[in-house]
Amino acid sequence: MVIENASSTSNEAKRLEALRSYEILDTPPEAAFDRITKIASLVMEAPICLISLIDADRQWFKSRQGLDAIETPRNIAFCSHAIMQDDVMIVSDALEDLRFVDNPLVLGDPAIRFYAGAPLKTPSGYKIGTLCLIDRKPRKATASQIECLRTLAHLAVEEMELRIAGRKALEELRSKQRELSKMRHELEQTRRFSAMGEMSASIAHEINQPLAAVVTNAQAGLRWLETAAPDLNEVRSSLKRIVNDGYRASTVLASIRAFFKKGPSEAIPLDINEIIQEIILLLQSELESQEILVKTELGNSLPKVLAERAQLQQVIFNLLINAAEAMSTTKDRARVLRVKSVGHPSEVVVDVEDTGPGIDPNNMDRVFESLFTTKSGGMGMGLSICRSIIEAHGGRIWVTPSTPYGSNFHVMLPIAGASGES
Ligand SMILES: Nc1ncnc2c1ncn2[C@@H]1O[C@H](COP(=O)(O)OP(=O)(O)OP(=O)(O)O)[C@@H](O)[C@H]1O
Ligand SMILES: [Mg+2]
């Protein structure tokens, strides 16, 4: 007896690659596929219906109605033959078909007599399996039943394609999240750096004056000693050391300050709304976990501001973090963070408003000072950095109480091309 060889297709390697790209083999049953086999078996009134995927040496069932086996060897599978054809393969009576007459699935369980299998064809044309119907008695299939089988096979492939698209979208989302957390890390780093810069500024300010006095006094002492006594080399050299140390300390502080001082920035025209949205996205999970509702009212087609991107990100970041920190104690009302941007003829104003406890009127003038903080773990640098940045951009930052509670921080930035800018 001549039996057609169905153990391999002509494009087998690529076909298997296509099948594996769906990552569906050996996955648990899924309702979407079970619904397809259920409809097919109802329409055809057949007791067995399968979504069979033809792997290298087995057929594995993604969905099955009326059959317990989860897979069978490929060399005895009817579906191995069905994927050799372009359209639905019908075997009306297996006992009258030379290819199947001595097949163990015909002679033994599940005793196949009737078979109808529609190839599952991928968009690139690979037949990775079938949607098939099996009956234990010989019979025929009507044209509309065959058409129905064809359509459901198409639907099964579409389901698989959807899963690939879903995985791709998830992967993209994950990579976006990785990018965001990297950006968040960098911003935090910059924040610390600027904080150190600001801190060194105030340390320098505090220490420079006494240092200058040490230097002046030491020099005066030296002059006095030189006229009052004939030989005081020992005293002179130690006083000189004081002078030297004094100079050195002040030089070190000056160089730290110079190192952290914001150098000439790479100011470019920027859309402030873009930055606001970026930072909100960056802090989204943090804000969500603190049950903070973010409301944005961003002006349409705002004029651009001339600024350095990283610095503006820093400002918005600090303001949003402060608002979130302020609302951490808000228990009896909604935690709402409102970010608003408005364009004016020569400037753009951003408001960051929260429903936190607000600022004590006595502290209103001090919140922008460096090292002023009311938080146990705060450095008191965030707002002073914001102010340095905004003023370096020719803008202004201030705060007003928000009614009935909370604070409202305002940032004004001149627009690119406005007076003074080129
Ligand atoms: N949205 C706000 N609501 C109420 N108080 C605020 C708000 N923003 C800032 N403040 C007050 O201003 C102080 C200074 O804020 P700033 O951001 O400069 O420092 P910080 O948040 O305390 O510490 P860090 O250096 O970590 O930012 C805060 O400690 C807080 O008392
Ligand atoms: Mg802060």
Image (cartoon, rainbow, N blue to C red):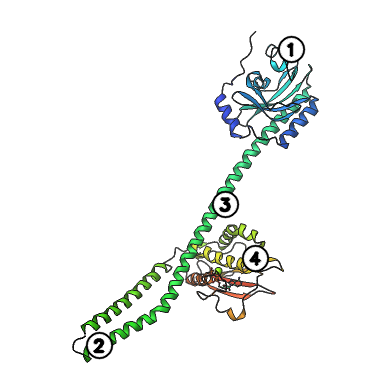
Residue 43 quadrant = top right
Q: CA distance from mark 1 to mark 2?
A: 124 Å
Name the amino acid, label 4.
Leu
Identify the mark nearer the N-term, 1 or 2. Answer: 1
Cβ–Cβ below 8 Å for labels 1 and 2? no
Looking at the rendered image, the disc whose residue lies closer to the viewer, 1 or 2, is 2
Q: Which residue is mark 4?
A: 337
Looking at the rendered image, the disc whose residue lies closer to the viewer, 1 or 4, is 1
Name the amino acid, label 3.
Gln
Q: Which mark is residue 223?
A: 2
Cβ–Cβ below 8 Å for labels 3 and 1? no
Identify the mark nearer the N-term, 1 or 4. Answer: 1
Q: What residue appears at the point 62 percent right and 69 percent down from the top-left corner?
A: 326
Q: CA distance from mark 1 to mark 4?
A: 75 Å
Residue 161 quadrant = top right
Q: CA distance from mark 4 to mark 3?
A: 22 Å
Q: Which residue is mark 1?
A: 95
Cβ–Cβ below 8 Å for labels 1 and 4? no
Q: Quadrant of ligand 1?
A: bottom right
Q: Is residue 324 left or right of residue 250?
A: right
Name the amino acid, label 2.
Arg
Residue 335 quadrant = bottom right
Identify the mark nearer the N-term, 2 or 3. Answer: 3
Cβ–Cβ below 8 Å for labels 4 and 3? no
